[in-house]
Amino acid sequence: MISLIILITISLLSSLAVTWLLIGFLQRRQILDRPNHRSSHHQPTPRGGGIAVLAAIVLAWITAVELGLLPETLLIVLALAVGLGVICFIDDLRGLGAQLRFISQFAAVVMGLAVLPNGGLFANELPAVLDLAITAVVWLWFINLFNFMDGIDGITGVETMVISCGLCGLIWLTGGSDWIFATSLTIAGAAAGFLIWNWHPARIFLGDVGSIPLGFLLGWLCIAVAGQSPGVGSVPWTAVLILPLYYFFDATGTLLSRLWRRQNIFEAHREHAYQRAVIHGRRHDQVSAAVAICGLGLWLAALVITPVTAIGGLLAAIIMVAGLLAWMRRPKT
């Protein structure tokens, strides 16, 4: 317990401190997100806060490995996330192109799959090759939807804490691997430290350097939890799916809607439900707080209802997310 307190303290405080340092550095270097007609903010704001989040996670995970709380193979996953972050930051500064970004993500996913402890999302239900192929596609989409959804103050910090703390809860309830609990906890701490500076009105944005690696790490942890062997520590994949369900529905639903209307899905837009909520007059913090409240409901569905009835838990989660999406898209009265 003391070791876990040390880890979350390290990740939270280092994220808080490095983000503060980054604000001044990025402002001096004019690395700013400047508002345009598709933006949800109105002032030039430093982007690249993900550097602080990644730095905090790196420091906490290396410390955990030294304390014997994490297996050394986790450093491979961490190195892949850092590599994605570096590529994203260079892309922000110079523009590397979508093709190179996708290739780097695909390569990271393939190498990440190779170090999964127990196979993919459906390791207990499908043949290994099919399981890993489906898992790779889902993981790639998760990485990108995590990036697409990072469009208003606080939302990705909140979602990161919903998923990582939810994974902690699942591991605690099922008696699963302690290292998953430790890694999820440190990610939550890093997100909390950053969120202090990113809450509305944000003084810094996460940027692709943060959202892409976070999507990669959280995706890997979700797969690792869902793929645990049956018996002690076994977690139904439906319980894991419930945790990021809001991000999945908003991003996927918006993509399918744009495809249906034959719009360019690669063009930036403001059609996600959370963006519509801001357009309708709701503040960023109101929308992010609503995501947090929905996250509490998703915890209830995943941790309490799903162990009794998987279908019931998933249905309850879908109803809650549908309610949140309807509220976001309804004009403010």
Image (cartoon, grey):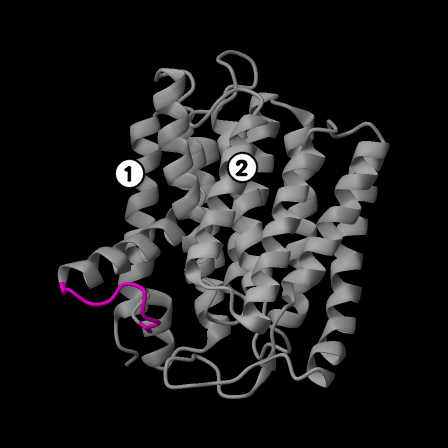
The residue sitting at 56% across, 19% down in the picture is: 233
Of residues 231 and 324, which is closer to you in this image? 231
Q: Quarter of the image holding residue 183?
A: top right
The residue sitting at 48% across, 65% down in the picture is: 288
Residue corresponding to mark 2: 220
Which segment is the magenta one?
261-270
In x, y percent, where is residue 312?
Answer: 30, 32
Separation of marks 1 and 2 at Cα, in angstroms: 25 Å
In x, y percent, where is residue 121?
Answer: 42, 28
Q: Which amino acid, by three-letter code, is at mark 2?
A: Trp
Tag 2, which secondary structure?
Answer: helix
Asked if residue 88 lies left or right of residue 315, the reply is right
Residue corresponding to mark 1: 315
Q: Quadrant of the C terminus?
A: bottom left
The residue sitting at 74% across, 59% down in the picture is: 15
Q: Quarter of the image holding residue 51?
A: bottom right
Q: Going by the picture, which residue comes out furthest to the bottom?
A: 43
